[in-house]
Each structure stands twice: as structure tokens, then as C-alpha cells.
């Protein structure tokens, strides 16, 4: 299933979900800067594990092989960093959250989702934001394995939110009943983080 409808690119200046392609205060770059707080962890897929816990009926622990059996999707999307650079039209392949969550039995109390990652990074989104149709757990970038500096072997990418809302080297999801700050959220960044509303800080 491809979410990208090429016809939409014929609407000048509008992205795949009907918003201005360049959010306010952003500048386009052809580069792909690496924005990491700390070191790049090196994780082999043979030892990679993905945990699910918190407000769920049954915690999960998936291996790489198990994760690759979930439905795979390629999206074309734009990347917006809160430090004001944006990258356009990359193809990301992996498992959409909305498909992954079908394999998790949520408790009715689950309202927020904390991403956990190798290295200790965390970030929190509402369940509603995670259910956006293009939130993806990506292992492939423009047809190549996602490079370690950009979060390989697996990262989260949230095209409708600033990029800090997706954890590189993701290794688990914790479902929460209440809004709880992750790494940057504790440091003054906000939870919804909508680039078109310039929700950068607090
Ligand atoms: N684990 C982890 N994930 C992270 C970060 C980080 O420091 N550690 N930085 C975030 C920020 S602020 C951005 S802009 C993007 C940067 O992704 P890139 O390095 O691939 O450009 O990753 C996000 N995810
Ligand atoms: Mo960022």
C-alpha cells in the first residue's frame, strides 16, 4: 500500500495532507543533518528487540524478524526539525503505527505513547497523534537501509510533527494514561509540536 498519491504533487505548494509544504519559519535544505543528543548507538538487528508495555492488556517483546512480518508500507514525506530546517520528498519504508497497534491490545486508559530508544532518548505523543496515517517505524530510507546516524536500524518518523517527536534507534513503546514529558519535552519543548502552528516550545 502506498500512501503517496503522486497527483497531489501537482498542487503547487501543498503537501500530501493539504498543508503548505514549508511550515512557517522553516528553511528548505537538500542536506540531511544529523541531530542527536549524545552518541550514535550501534545496534545489530540480531540483538535488536522491541518492547511494548504500560496501559496494555499484554506486554510484548518482538525480535527483528517478528517486526518485519508486520505489514510494510512506503510513504513519501517531508521532515521538519524544530531548529528550522526542512527536507522534502524522501521515501520511508517500515511499519505504520496504525498497523502496528492492531497487534497490541490497548487498555481503554491508554491515551499517550512514550517512545523509548537505545541510548535512553524518549519522546511522548498523544495516541491521537500516533494514529495519524503516516506515523512510521522506518528501517529503509530512499530504498536503502536507514544509516545508523539517522536512527538505523529502526526509527520513528512523524511527518506531521517536528522531528524530535520520533525516536531514532527506537526499542519500545510505553502506553500511558497521562501526558508525561520525554527528553526534550522535559527541556521546555511541547507535546503536540505541530509545525504549522509553530508549536516549538512549552
Ligand atoms: N534517539 C534519539 N532520537 C532522536 C533524537 C535524538 O537525539 N536521539 N533527536 C531528535 C531530533 S531533535 C531530530 S530533528 C531528529 C533528527 O533526525 P536526523 O538526525 O536523522 O536528522 O531525530 C529526533 N530523534
Ligand atoms: Mo530537531
Image (cartoon, grey):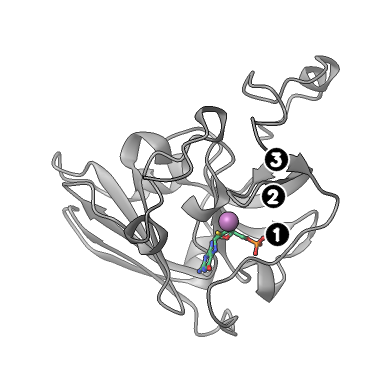
x, y percent for residue 115: 39, 60
Question: Is residue 135 found left or right of 111 in the rendered image?
Answer: right
Quadrant hosting residue 141: bottom right
Label 3 – label 1 distance at C-alpha: 15 Å
Find out whether the residues at labels 1 and 2 contact each other: C-beta distance under 8 Å. yes
Q: Which residue is mark 2?
A: 92
Residue at 68 percent across and 22 percent down: it is: 20
Q: Tell me which label, 1 or 2, sits earlier in the chain.
A: 2
Figure check: 122 above or below 1: below
Find out whether the residues at labels 2 and 3 contact each other: C-beta distance under 8 Å. no
Instruction: Return the residue nearer the eye: 130 or 194.
Output: 194
Question: Which mark, residue 78?
Answer: 3
Figure check: 5 above or below 42: above
Residue at 36 percent across and 55 percent down: it is: 185
Helix, strand or loop status at disc 1 = strand
Find out whether the residues at labels 3 and 1 contact each other: C-beta distance under 8 Å. no
Question: Which mark, residue 140?
Answer: 1
Task: Tell me if residue 29 can be seen.
Answer: yes
Residue at 17 percent across and 53 percent down: it is: 55
Question: Is residue 55 found left or right of 200 in the rendered image?
Answer: left
Question: Is residue 102 found left or right of 138 in the rendered image?
Answer: left
Q: Tell me which label, 2 or 3, sits earlier in the chain.
A: 3
Q: How many marks?
A: 3
Quadrant hosting residue 46: bottom right
Helix, strand or loop status at disc 2 = strand
Instruction: Return the residue nearer the eye: 61 or 201.
Output: 201
Figure check: 187 above or below 193: below
Label 1 – label 2 distance at C-alpha: 6 Å
x, y percent for residue 160: 55, 36
Question: Which mark, residue 87?
Answer: none
Helix, strand or loop status at disc 3 = strand
Amino acid at each position: 500500500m502506498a500512501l503517496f498519491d503522486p497527483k497531489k504533487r501537482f498542487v503547487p505548494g501543498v503537501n500530501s495532507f493539504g498543508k503548505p509544504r514549508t511550515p512557517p519559519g522553516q528553511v528548505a535544505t537538500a542536506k540531511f543533518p544529523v541531530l542527536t543528543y549524545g552518541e550514535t548507538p550501534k545496534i545489530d538487528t540480531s540483538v535488536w528487540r522491541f518492547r511494548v508495555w504500560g496501559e496494555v492488556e499484554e506486554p510484548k517483546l518482538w525480535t527483528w524478524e517478528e517486526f518485519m512480518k508486520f505489514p510494510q508500507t512506503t510513504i513519501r514525506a517531508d521532515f521538519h526539525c524544530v531548529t528550522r530546517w526542512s527536507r522534502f520528498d524522501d521515501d520511508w519504508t517500515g511499519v505504520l503505527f496504525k498497523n502496528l497497534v492492531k497487534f497490541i491490545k490497548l487498555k481503554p486508559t491508554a491515551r499517550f505513547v512514550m517512545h523509548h530508544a537505545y541510548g535512553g532518548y524518549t519522546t511522548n505523543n498523544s495516541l491521537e497523534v500516533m494514529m495519524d496515517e503516516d506515523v512510521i517505524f522506518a528501517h529503509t530510507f530512499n530504498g536503502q537501509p536507514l544509516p545508523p546516524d539517522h536512527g538505523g536500524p529502526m526509527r520513528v518518523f512523524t511527518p506531521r510533527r517536528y522531528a524530535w517527536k520520533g525516536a531514532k534507534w527506537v526499542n519500545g513503546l510505553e502506553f500511558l494514561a497521562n501526558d508525561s514529558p520525554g527528553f526534550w519535552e522535559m527541556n521546555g519543548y511541547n507535546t503536540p509540536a505541530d509545525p504549522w502552528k509553530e508549536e516549538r516550545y512549552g
